[in-house]
Image (cartoon, rainbow, N blue to C red):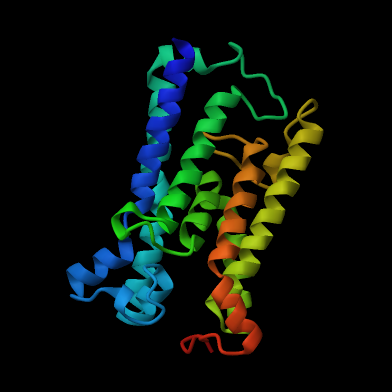
Amino acid sequence: MGIFIIILVFILISVISYLFGSIPSGVLIGKIFYHKDIREFGSHNSGGTNAGRTLGKKAGLITIILDMLKLIIPFFTCYFLFTYVPALQELMMASPDDTLNIFGKGNTLIQLTYYLSAFFVIIGHGHSIFLRFKGGKYVSTFAGAQISLSYLTFPLFGSIFFLILKIKKHVSESSIYTGGSICLFSWIVYIIYACTYSIGDYSQYLMRFNQGPTCSIYYPMLMTVSYILLVYRHRENIKRLKEGTENSIKWMK
């Protein structure tokens, strides 16, 4: 019976996360406020970059922010279940204490649920059920997952993104390089955590995990798999970058 309930929790959180990730912010903003379907213009993509290119910088920025915030409700759902439903928390706890281990602080099943939530939000964004399983290129939700784990990393990776963007003038190229730096950073944080958990969590000096998910092997795994998806979705952009035909931004001087 316990295994059945745990499976149901995994399915529930995954479905909720996927549905929130599937919300096509750019398409909704375009249709409601501009009476345009951004998929009919520019790159025909539903993400923030094409929204900005089609509807203007303001609409593009709002789209990106909304896409980054998609993880909030799924994370709060996890937090509510594991905080205010004692029976469920007890069922999913491997041990009654909060012993540090290489899989993260606390129970691995609870940690797995949080990271599954982030993963399915990212999948929903790229393969929205509301857009016939098409969608954005994972960038906004990939960044949103990182920021949800620790807002302290936003100044670092935001600076990297805009620095590369200023130099290269390509959003796609900046997204790929920044995503790679986030992926590498996640492994550095985890390795420090895994090597020092018995004497103290020194990874907290690089990244502060807040209420909910903690540092665990699921963190770099999530970032790595998501980054692979991000690069794959940008394969046409990579081809155009090699050919020198990729669209460049005009607004950053």
Is 126 above or below relative to 221?
below
Q: Nearer the viewer, residue 32 or 98?
A: 32
Which quadrant holds the N terminus?
top left
Instruction: Name the quadrant containing residue 51.
Output: bottom left
Total marks placed: 0
Q: Is residue 100 visible?
A: yes
Q: Position of residue 215 (x, y in %)?
A: 64, 37
Q: Is residue 163 left or right of residue 31?
A: right
Quick one: 222 or 43, which is closer to the camera? 43
At a point 40% along the width and 67% down the height, the residue shown is 47
Which residue occupies 25% across, 67% down? 29
- Residue 67 x/y as whole percent: 39, 58
Q: Is residue 204 above or below residue 82?
A: below
Q: Is residue 39 left or right of residue 160?
A: left
Q: Residue at x 22, y 76 (%)?
A: 36
- Which quadrant would residue 160 be assigned to in this image? bottom right
Question: Can you say whether 25 is above or below 114 in the image?
Answer: below
Q: Nearer the viewer, residue 111 or 189?
A: 111
Image coords of residue 65 (percent x, y): 39, 61
Whole-percent x, y for residue 159 in the image? 60, 68
